[in-house]
Each structure stands twice: as C-alpha cells, then as structure tokens.
Image (tube, helix red, strand yellow):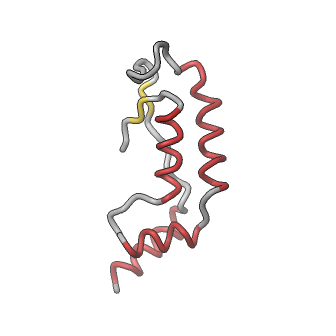
Amino acid sequence: MKLKILILISLIITGCTSYKPIIDSAGRSGTFPTTKAIEITNDLQHCETLANKNTNFFGNLGHLITSPTAETKYKMIYKNCMKNRGHSVLND
C-alpha cells in the first residue's frame, strides 16, 4: 500500500508526460536505407502529440498501480512512434 501511495505522489509531482526519448541522431535503423535524423524535431512533436492524445493521467496511474515496474502507456506510445519513424531510441 505504501508503494502505491509513493507511486501516486511521484506521478503527481513529476507528471505522466515527463518522458523525453534519447535519440542517436547519427545512427539509423537497419530497416531504412537513409538517415531519418533530419526529421527528428518534427517526429518528436508528432509523437509527443500522439502519445498525449491517446493517454490520460488516470489510465497511466492504473497501469502503474497494477504493474509498478511497467512503463507508462504514454512512454510506450512515444517510444514506439519514434522507433517506427526510423529513430534509434536509446533509453528503453
């Protein structure tokens, strides 16, 4: 119970949308023949918007309470979006 309260307090303080992916802009995914780093700013904005539109505070909170070691749905959507756009996300 104390763990759940601690998680709730930390979510309220830091917010659910504090994830910022670390991208290797010099590298490229093996599935893309050219680098995608030139689109990084645009992709970051699009993926953040997509993750915000498809998650909410209570959904992320419920996800973390049921599995405290799991990443939030927001982080999962954001990270997958960046990877699917051809960026190498380092902080999995």
Q: Residue at x 51, y 66 (%)?
A: 60
Left or right: where 51 falls relative to 73: right
Instruction: Tell me residue 81's x, y (percent).
Output: 53, 40
Q: Nearer the viewer, residue 14 or 88?
A: 88
- Assign the N terminus to one quadrant of the image: bottom left
In front here: 63 or 18? 63
Q: Residue furthest bottom?
A: 1
What is the quadrant of the C terminus in the image? top left
Q: Is residue 64 above or below residue 36?
A: below
Relative depth, front residue between 17 and 92 = 92
- Residue at the farthest top position: 34
Q: Residue at x 61, y 45 (%)?
A: 48
Left or right: 69 as drawn, with respect to 40: left
| Residue 40 versus residue 17 in the image, above or below | above
- Total number of numbered discs in the rendering: 0
Is the residue 15 above or below the residue 38 in the image?
below
